[in-house]
Amino acid sequence: MSRLEWALATVVTIILIGTIGFMVLGLSFVDAMYMTIITITTVGYRELTGPNVTYAEKIFTMIIIVTGVSTVLYTFTLTLQVVIEGQLREFVGRRRMDRKIADMQGHVVVCGWGRVGQAAARDLQRSGADVVVIDSDDQRVHDINLPTIVGDATLDETLRTAGVDRARALVAALEGDAENLFVTLSSREMNPDMFIVARARQDDSVEKLSRAGADRVVNPQELGAARMASFVVQPNVAEFVDVVMHERSMDFRMREVEIGAGSPVAGISLREADFRRRAGVLVLALRGDDGVFATNPDPDMVLHPHHVIIAVGTADALQELVRVCQ
């Protein structure tokens, strides 16, 4: 039992003892409780013991005054302390979180803490990304173990507080397509180089979000339906992709790596790069500057900066691939 609970229980006990005691001294139940309460609260509004107060009544009243008043004052002080400490703790925690967000660079901003936002944040954390969450519902994000901003994500001020201008990516996962459109427009204006993924509920919103600046637009319902269909048609392939991409229960991973301008493999062919020997990975596809995927690419294809390699391998091998391509 906490100190506050103990103090409240003591106050209730004293009220009961005082009520019973005054009833024994001749008062009714209501009058006895009334006398007890005005005594321990030091109100002294109007005593009901009559003009001829007996010796026993005086002794009992003094005991109630000494024990009751001190207990009530202690309980009041403890209650005030708990309230002030809670508010102070919340204030200090908020300031500390704001400073942490202000120092973040290259993080991912997730707008909306619904099912889609939570799933996205969970996978981003698994990948080692720093995540900042924006949601308008204080209760919904109260206990999450992530930096949070409580506010309207469609407002520029809220996005700036979340560090959108310093973020590398943003996930617009609000409930409505109009809200996600506002977030996409504002975020693209603040950070032209940021990668934006937006959620769409309606099919006709996909093109609008793309025109607003979203790099990728996802319809969770359509994506879920396609995934269900793939489990029916090719269950083993679908499950293998899920395990490799999300569950991380296998040694092999799939990853995309962009070739840097100073990479030793820039300007040479895929055959000469020999990623199987250099890093121990298998190259599945290559995406060029035109955005077109070359699956099972030609070994004589020349690699250039900003080409994106999609490879599969162990975690250590993929990390080596990142080092080689930098």
Image (tube, rainbow, N blue to C red):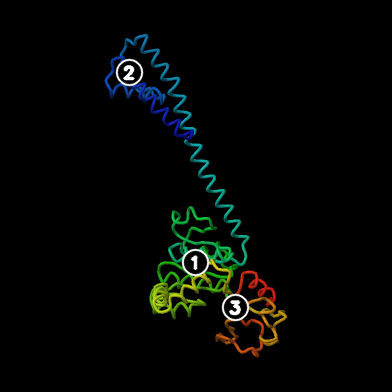
Measuring from the top left, give residue 47's x and y in whole percent.
Answer: 34, 19
Whether 15 is drawn above or below 224: the answer is above
Q: In the orientation shown, which residue stands out farthest toward the left?
A: 28
Residue depicted at x 59% and y 59%: 101
Q: Which residue is drawn at 57% across and 56% down?
A: 98
Dot 3 falls on a residue whose secondary structure is strand
Q: Name the residue under label 1.
A: 120
Q: Nearer the viewer, residue 128 or 13?
A: 128
Q: Is residue 266 above or below residue 58?
A: below
Q: How crowded is mark 2: few (under 14 residues within 10 Å), some or many (20 or more)?
A: many
| Amino acid type indicated by mark 1 | Ala
- The secondary element bearing badge 1 is classed as helix
Numbered disc 2: secondary structure: helix
Residue drawn at x 51%, y 41% is 84
- Give amino acid for label 3: Ala
Q: Mark 2 points at which residue?
A: 22
Q: Mark 3 points at which residue?
A: 311
